[in-house]
Image (tube, rainbow, N blue to C red):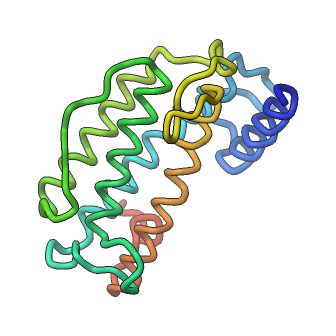
Amino acid sequence: MKSKLWIVAGLLVGTALSFAGVSRGQAQGEVVANPVSATVKGQLARYEKNMVAAAELMPAEKYGFKPTPEMSTFGHVVMHIMQSNNNLCSKISGTAAPDFKLEEVDGKDKLVLGLKRSFEFCTTALANADDSKLGEQIPLFGGKMMPRAVAWIALSDGWNDHYGQQAIYLRLNGILPPTAQAEKK
């Protein structure tokens, strides 16, 4: 089981690196000391920029929008991203998560503030985290004991998933998501 986890982690890191390109000034082919944590930390600023921008682009009156009755509101998506960031970055780092409670109906300003704070927390909490404890068992997802590597992967996967969700909600409201907009010079 442990060897399978490392194979999966290696494949995910390889895929992430191929999508991200060479990061942090590393030469192609250079051995990375902490490939999992370095990759996720390298993604953090980009996802913070895009996810916060997406939350800011959605008009306040559209925070209750949901594509179908069964789906979450846009406000709920923003709240969920904040909660995921705080929970996973806390679990990865062993640092207590901020006590900032939100409800999906709290309004755009408060939800965007909570989202920004969650990315600030992740930046600080992950600053000294590395790959040395990837195999350490920690309680995740309902208290089930899992390797810390799962939290790193879930954080990165969550950013991909949730930004895609934000982008779809924006497009359904006639708004181009941040990554589809022309760069300002």
Residue 118 lies, with reference to residue 3, above or below; the image says: below
Between 88 and 166, the residue placed more toward the observer is 88
The image quarter in which residue 144 lies: top right
Q: Is residue 39 left or right of residue 74?
A: right
Residue name at image x 40 percent, y 71 percent: 177
Residue name at image x 79 percent, y 33 percent: 5
User: Quadrant where the C terminus lies?
Assistant: bottom left
Expressed as whole percent of the image width and height from the top left, the position of residue 140 reads 52, 34
Expressed as whole percent of the image width and height from the top left, the position of residue 35 reads 69, 26
Expressed as whole percent of the image width and height from the top left, the position of residue 55 reads 28, 62
Of all residues, the one furthest to the front in this rendering is 143
User: Quadrant where the N terminus lies?
Assistant: top right
Q: Is residue 130 left or right of residue 63?
A: right
Is residue 25 visible in this depiction of the protein? no
The image quarter in which residue 76 lies: bottom left
Residue 172 lies, with reference to residue 40, above or below; the image says: below
Is residue 66 visible in this depiction of the protein? yes
The image quarter in which residue 109 lies: bottom left
Residue name at image x 26 percent, y 65 percent: 75
Between 60 and 31, the residue placed more toward the observer is 60
Residue 14 lies, with reference to residue 177, above or below; the image says: above
Residue name at image x 16 percent, y 63 percent: 108
**What is the tally of numbered marks visible in this picture?**
0
Expressed as whole percent of the image width and height from the top left, the position of residue 122 reads 38, 32
